[in-house]
Amino acid sequence: MKKRGTRLTGELLAVVIIMTLFAVGLWSLLRDEEKTVQWCYVITCEDLCREALVPVTAVYTNVQGPTILSVDFHGVKTDGTYCGFISSADSTQRVSGSGTSSFNIFTGTRKDLSRIIIVVSLSRNGLWNNHTHSAVTKSIPLKDCGYEKGTAASVHYGLFDNEPAQEKNMKMNEKANSILKIINTVLIFFITGLACIKTVYPASLTGQERQFNKNYWRFIAAFMILVGLLTIPPLRLMLTDAVREVSRANDWYSGRRYLQRIITVIIVSATMGVVGLIINRIREKHYSYLIIFSGTTGLFLVTMLRLLSYHNIDAFFNYPVMGLRLWLIIDCVAFFLIIAGIIMQGTGKIHAHNE
């Protein structure tokens, strides 16, 4: 009994150390510095007027082109909530190097807006879905006034990073990505079903080994059920929308990046702590247990972190590798590990190991 208590104390101490190391390392890695964009700033009126055509000049430097520069207005409601796209410039312009581009943008007719955010983006074809860089101004007051060109004072507005400033690979193979998404979804539910079956019909072992195998598959089934639920697109969208509305209603939407960073650190450090504990418990078992557990952990982490929509994490998981999104490749590797481990157990190697 004393030996067992000493072992548990040692394991808990190791878990705390692992979690602390991951938390400190990840926290420093995910530092969210709000730095001014170096490639562009805009000049427009100090106060914007409702239902008016506003002149906006974008001053850009060192733009790798030719590429298309677009300017859009996004709105902030009187209650402080962000309401997205309002209107776009009367034209887009192909730019390269350094220079200026002038636009006229209508502020719209909505009466529930109090501020405007100017969004500047670069893309190969002028479409937001294909943008390579984007940046935003601080929110600019929107007022009821009779707008007359030239009467309002012009102000320089610096732009801030809207997302990590990295080039996106325009050779992303979206068809291959779509096929992989479908395959991954099918495999998630297939493996979940198989794991549930294994909890009812465990490997034909005896005694403690049989109970261990049964409990192990219960654990794997619980993980896979959670992953499967969070993979369903309507449910993911519903959760994202619910969190967004709660954050806006409680007035902490603007600080969501900091909260996302905290949650990311908690998820990763807690998962790594549990992983260390379980690996210590199964290290003397057949290696198929470790292989299956590794794949399941990878799937769980990718699913949970992508659900957070934290832009640093999204940029990492969506990084293109041979035209495929990185998170899909990680999922495929995880599925391979799980299936390989299941096959190993099915061929009877687990029985030979235990004998």
Image (spheres, helix red, strand yellow):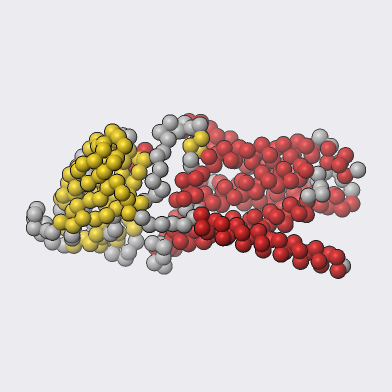
In this rendered view, identify the residue nearer to me: 26 or 178: 26
Q: Position of residue 206 (x, y in %)?
A: 89, 48
Q: Residue at x 24, y 41 (%)?
A: 98
Name the residue rendered at 59%, 41% in the picture: 331
Residue at screen point 45% across, 51% down? 311
Q: From the viewer's perspective, is 182 left or right of 152?
A: right
**Picture layout, residue 257 above or below residue 319:** below
4 on left or right of 247 = right
For residue 89, side relative to residue 212 (left or right): left
The image quadrant where one finds the N terminus is bottom right
* One can see residue 52 in this view: yes
When the figure is inspected, residue 210 is found, relative to residue 49, above or below; the finding is above
Count of numbered labels shown in the rendering: 0
Asked if residue 195 can be seen in this view, the reply is no
What x and y, as percent, mark residue 135?
32, 49
User: On the image, which quarter does residue 145 sit in?
Assistant: bottom left
Whether 123 is drawn above or below 150: the answer is above
Q: Where is residue 178 in the image (x, y as percent from the top left)?
A: 50, 34
- Which quarter of the image is occupied by the C terminus? top right
The residue nearer to you, when weighing 76 against 269, is 269
Query: Is residue 78 toward the left or the right of residue 235 in the image?
Result: left
Q: Which residue lies furthest to the right in this view?
A: 355
Q: Position of residue 129 (x, y in %)?
A: 37, 40
Identify the residue shown where x is 61% and y is 46%. Answer: 299
